[in-house]
Amino acid sequence: MKPKNMIFRSIILLLLTGLSTQVMAQQKWTLQKCIQYAQDNGLDIKRAELNVQDAVYLEKLAEQERLPNLNGSAGGGLSFGRRIDPFSNLPVTQKLGYNSIALSTNVNIYNGGRIKNTIKQRGIDKAAAKADYEQSGQNIALDVAVAYLNILLAEDQLENSKNQFSLSQTQLEQTDKLIKAGARPAADLLDIKAQIAQDEQLIVSRENDVALAYLNLKQLLELEPDKPFGISRPEITVPEDADPEGFTLNKVYQKAVNNQPGIQAGELRVEAAKVGIDISKADRLPRLSGFAEISSNYSSLAQRGTGVLSEILIPQEVIFNSQSTTFEFKQEIEGREDTPYFNQLADNFGQVVGLNLSIPIYNRGQVKTNIQRAELALKTSQINDQAQKQQLKENIQRAIADARAGKKNYDAALQTEEALEIAYNNTDKKFKLGASNTLEFTTAKNRLEQAKVSTIIAKYDYLFKLKVVDFYMGKKIVL
């Protein structure tokens, strides 16, 4: 029995673990969690992050231009026919094997400030890339907040439709009782059933709206469409201290200029373009660099003395009294052998050190043209910065106007709903007393339903427009 109990307990434990994992996978996501996840996984964010990394590499490359380089070279081959022997520097016709090696370095001493200004420009570009990265994070946060609010809006509309459906069913039961009691005509039942069918159809439409709203948020989060996912519903209330009429364009704009990283990136690019002119002007100035090299070579024909002497007889013809006589003279000569490879490298080792001065005199107008192009780049960046700030000002002005209109629309929707709620309650009482027909009751009910839907839409629309103004003022997006 004990082994069976152990197996049974193991199975139960596995089932509970699976259920626990499933529950964890379906935990509700808060707005802040959605924003953080989107900022960590969004493709635009990753692209901006790569741009920052590339800017870091470019700055590093510019800084390394100050350092000397070091390069090695080696070559060798087999030569046939007439050529110069690299060891003796004499022409030879024998088969020749050769090899050469060298190590060289070069360092910039002065180049008109090009390296210094390039490092400065790359540093500004890096700061601009970081600002773009931060702006991407803020943009995705706003997009996620909008998608999150759209889900809440769709769910509230769905809930309202379900309430209306429940209300219609209750009305159907009451009408059926009144018909059986003879207080209402039987035709009234058909009108209520038709209304229930419309309510059911609206529920299906609202459910589809919820599904589409979730799909939109999943796309922003880079989640698979079929991934189990749900959001946490915070207490959605319109801030009581919200006062769109108190918003002023200059106040919001000044905060936006100081808090929007995209604006800062534009200003940084103007500074980088100014440095670009200095970089182009450096080509007008002389350049001074230092260089050094060590090298050696090897030849298969190279020989050296062995230190061993030997005697040889050298015949020499001598004419004496008009008669030719040949004599042999003794001469000592030293033996020869091939010079070893490493000995040749040591014997042929050479060093070179020096300075190189380059003075630009005429280069077909390229320097002048490059300076003119850098000046055009500066003007373009200034125009882009000005246009970006002008667009920001227009967006803020529109956001303030939208927030003010949103408040008025929301207040009007609340008043309309309140009035239609009273009208519906009066019609409901009359209907129950038989003093009102089904058409009047249905009309009052539908008008109230539309008013509630309008209030829900106006509420979320107003809340979103307030969040847009908060976004420009640099406030954290929270619900």
Image (tube, rainbow, N blue to C red):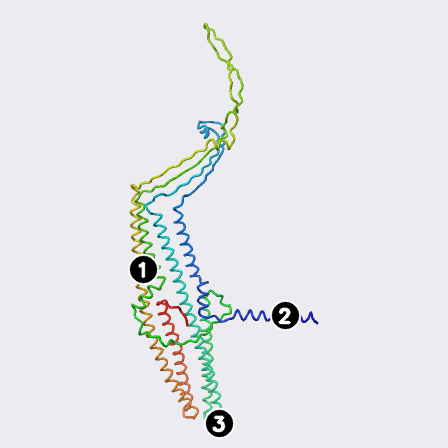
The image quadrant where one finds the C terminus is bottom left
Residue 8 or residue 443, whichever sits in front? 8
Q: Secondary structure at mark 3?
A: loop
For marks 3 and 1 on the same chain, the one whose residue lies earlier in the sequence:
3
Name of the residue lying farthest toward the right: 1
Measured in 3D between alpha carbons, the distance from the residue under mark 1 to the one under mark 2, in whole angstroms, is 66 Å
46 shown above or below 171? above
N-terminal label among 2 and 3: 2
Question: At x 68% / y 71%, what residue is drawn?
Answer: 4
Mark 1 and mark 2 lie on one chain; the one further toward the N terminus is: 2
Quadrant in which residue 419 is drawn? bottom left
Q: Position of residue 202 (x, y in %)?
A: 45, 78
Location of the N terminus by quadrant is bottom right
The type of residue carrying mark 2 is: Ile
Name the residue that disc number 1 marks: 385
- Dot 2 falls on a residue whose secondary structure is helix
Q: Locate residue 463, reporting x and y percent.
A: 38, 74
Separation of residues labelled 2 and 3 (CA atoms): 60 Å
Q: Does 35 sit above or below residue 416?
A: above
Mark 3 in CB contact with mark 1 (< 8 angstroms) = no
Q: Which mark is residue 181?
A: 3
Q: How crowded is the residue under tag 1: few (<14 C-alpha within 10 Å), some, or many (20+)?
A: many
* Mark 2 Cα shell of 10 Å, populated few (<14), some (14-19), many (≥20): few
Q: Which residue is mark 2?
A: 11
Residue drawn 49% across and 67% down? 225
Residue 14 placement, left or right of 291: right
Element type at mark 1: helix
Seen from the viewer's position, the closer of residues 110 and 4 is 110
Q: The disc labelled 3 sits on which kind of residue?
A: Ala
